[in-house]
Image: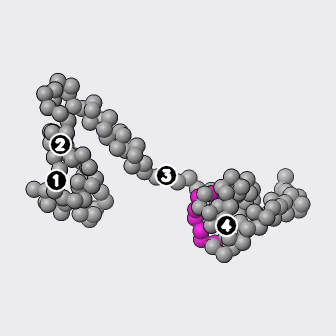
Amino acid sequence: MPPTRTDLLEKLIGSETKAELLMYFHDNPDSTDTVEGIAAKIRRKPKEIERDVSDLVELGLLQEVRVISFSKDRDQELQKEISQRLVSVGSFEDTSTSSNRDLTGVVMIDSLLPDGYPSSSVVIVMGDPATGKTTLLIQLV
């Protein structure tokens, strides 16, 4: 059943925050942002606008989009865990882990691998085509 006129008005302009949201999106129709980002732009707290944003999504004025992003911290955790599992326990007993790591002397790589690269292992360099992977590796040779 379609919403009544009163329900529609309530969902559209039932609060000062909804009015601010509508004005913001009328001024910025191509805006794409998180609730936190929108809240900052209209000088509100995210908790204050969540319900109003949901109402505008229900009405079809706003579109909610699922976003996927890469977690660098979690990636480093997983890389360390994988490295620990791949290195056999008995093969490096006499030497410390830090002595088996080397810096490359290439600032960019040393910033990506701050502890150095494990000299007895493989480092995978990945990237889109034409991003300089080959040039980077030539500098290491």
Quarter of the image holding residue 38? bottom right
Q: Give the residue furthest to the top.
A: 90
**In this figure, which residue is indicated by the disc labeled 2?**
101
Query: Which portion, as a residue range, is magenta?
Result: 29-35
**In this figure, which residue is indicated by the disc labeled 1?**
104
SS assignment at label 3: loop
How dense is the environment of label 3, judged by Cα within 10 Å: few (below 14), some, or many (20 and up)?
few
**In this figure, which residue is indicated by the disc labeled 4?**
42
Coordinates of residue 94 in the picture (x, y in percent): 13, 27
Q: Amino acid at mark 4?
A: Ile
How dense is the environment of label 2, judged by Cα within 10 Å: few (below 14), some, or many (20 and up)?
some
Q: CA distance from mark 1 to mark 4?
A: 47 Å
**Upstream in the sequence, badge 3 or badge 1?**
3
Q: Is residue 67 left or right of residue 44?
A: left
Q: Residue at x 42, y 51 (%)?
A: 70
Discs 1, 4 touching: Cβ within 8 Å: no
**Upstream in the sequence, badge 2 or badge 3?**
3
Q: Amino acid at mark 3?
A: Ile
